[in-house]
Amino acid sequence: MRSDTGRFRFLLVMFLTVVAGFSGTAFAAEDVPSRPNILWISCEDISPHLGCYGDPHAITPNVDQLATEGTRYTHAFTSAGVCAPCRSGIITGVYQSSLGTHHMRCEAQLPKRDGELYVKPFPMYLRDAGYYCTNNSKQDYQFKTPKGTWDDSSGKAHWRNRKNKNQPFFAVFNFVGCHESGIADTDKYIKVTEDLKPEERQEADALTTLPPYYADTPTIREDWKRNYELITAMDHWAGNLIQELKDEGLYENTIILFWSDHGVGLPRAKRWLYDSGTHIPLITRIPEQYRADGQGKPGTVTDQLVNSVDFGPTVLNLAGVEIPDYIQGQPFLGKNLPAPRDYVYGARDRMDERYDIIRMVRDKQYKYIRNFEPWKPILEYVSYLEQGATMTNLRDLHEAGQLPAEIDKLFTDAKAVEELYDCESDPHEMQNLATDPAYTDILARLRAEHLRWMKEVRDLGLIPEPILHERRAEVGSEYMILRQPGSLEYMDRLMKYANAATGGEVSILRDGLSDDDNVVRYWSATGMGNLAKGGALNGQQADKLKDLAQHDPTPVVRIQAARALCYLNMTEEALPILLKHLDEGTQWDRVFAATVLDEIDEQARPVIDEMKVGLQPVPEFHSNGKYRVRIMNRALNQLQGTKNSVE
């Protein structure tokens, strides 16, 4: 009997082998790769304006088809509303405000331990595990890319270039055509969309999805139309990549993730922490043999919360690579997953030449925003943004007094300290519920969660950038600044004084002016300036502020103390100090001084000729010359009564 059973099994195996040979079906284990290929199809500056997300105007058949074959995420968000800070978090799995990459166009130092790189771009772990890793081709990580991150990162990078065709690959392709410049630059828009068919074009007058924070003008409708057409061009590109996989017989061996780096490249979207800036499309397709625990079933729609810092650890998990302990994101696909998120988080800091410290936490329904510099308007002047037609149109209408009140408030001088939105009933986040007694419990819960998160990730945002650079020199990287003994207690102190700066607590601020810590003195001087600006501070503190402005060892403290003196009408004492720092010190000290001179506006008129020196770039500083010139150009045009321009 045993002999007959063995003979039967042998004949069965032979039969299946013959059938496999004729049918082309692979039964041998080695013919089904144990490790999946992974393809990222990323694009820039688009919100979920796709057909599969229910947008009535989107023409996106390729991405829509991908969604029917995979999973569409309705609650995916980025950690920043702008590309470079967000990308640093994507490539490391660490929040930008934790890593020190939170300021747009900075260059942070990655931390080391025992002489070895500690926080690494996650493709390095994939390469160590045998993956061929390519990037085509944008990096823009806010730090120097370590050697060994990619097998190839260039415009020619492709999975096809691997020598061993059986080697699993991780390939990134990024579409830059739908970047905000594609909307603002007519030549680029024409080039990107030149292959669209007539039926793929949009009629600006027919669009029904214009957000309520935009004036309904032909100029703004044209930008909205361009956004849709650029997205259709992106869909063509994405479809071509998918077809390449199919043509090479790799489609069923490759996991695909499609995503955008942040929201649409228009005002109050890109750069902001509203859903218009952080809510992104995310679609995944997992071939059947790589699905774990029921994941990846075709046509699935999920409201699971996902943050962009989760992308890297998810890829590692799908590839079977151990996720390093320092990674702050969490995998949402593959085996042995953690509990789904209850919240996603975001941060906004310097955008080119303008600082604005904002933090965000969101659950599936509600969003909380904390403005640490609420004295700055929502639509703060950022020169690159001002080049766009929509921003120009809105600002012109504001200055002419022709905007509806609901839109015009975006240009007011101050923001609320806290914002709370019901994103289900108010998807455009127009109604701030933070002062509504009916939402007291929700506000308290989200406020506490935002503070808990800031401490957990050791958020660096409350440390002024010039001081951040000084402390980096002491400990080797931004990341390590708040990982020293006593750092959590120190963060509590910073929170105390930053809150006082926006809450007007005079006694706390007065004591802080004499504190040994320069960040505490910075926030105290800033708070005193805010009180003086609002008429809530008398001259009793003038002597201490004057002493700080003249003698404090930290330039940004002197600058903020001089700002307070201006609002106490002591410009004769303050302006020489600001002018001195405009032309001396580190690059970011100069930007701070230029910002104050711009802010005080008419009070700077007595030194208008001296301010023109600020229009001279400083070659030895990469960014200071550009950013300081932009601020001073803006300030001088205001004082001279001319139209704002961008150098």
Image: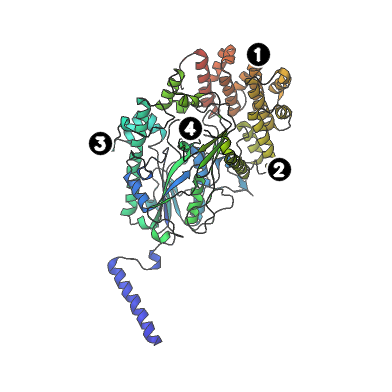
Query: Mark 2 or mark 4, which has the lower sequence index?
Result: 4
Observer-nearest of 431 and 504: 431
Mark 4 residue crowding within 10 angstroms, few (<14) / some (14–19) / many (20+): some
Element type at mark 3 = helix
Element type at mark 1 = helix
Distance Cα–Cα, label 4 vs label 3: 36 Å
Element type at mark 4 = loop
Mark 2 residue crowding within 10 angstroms, few (<14) / some (14–19) / many (20+): few
Question: Disc 2 designates what residue?
Answer: 486
Residue 643 image point, x, y percent: 45, 17
Residue 233 image point, x, y percent: 33, 39
Query: Mark 3 or mark 2, which has the lower sequence index?
Result: 3
Residue 430 image label: 4
Question: Disc 3 designates what residue?
Answer: 198
Mark 1 residue crowding within 10 angstroms, few (<14) / some (14–19) / many (20+): few
Distance Cα–Cα, label 3 vs label 1: 64 Å
Q: Which amino acid type corresponds to the residue marked 4 in the rendered image?
A: Met
Question: Disc 1 designates what residue?
Answer: 572
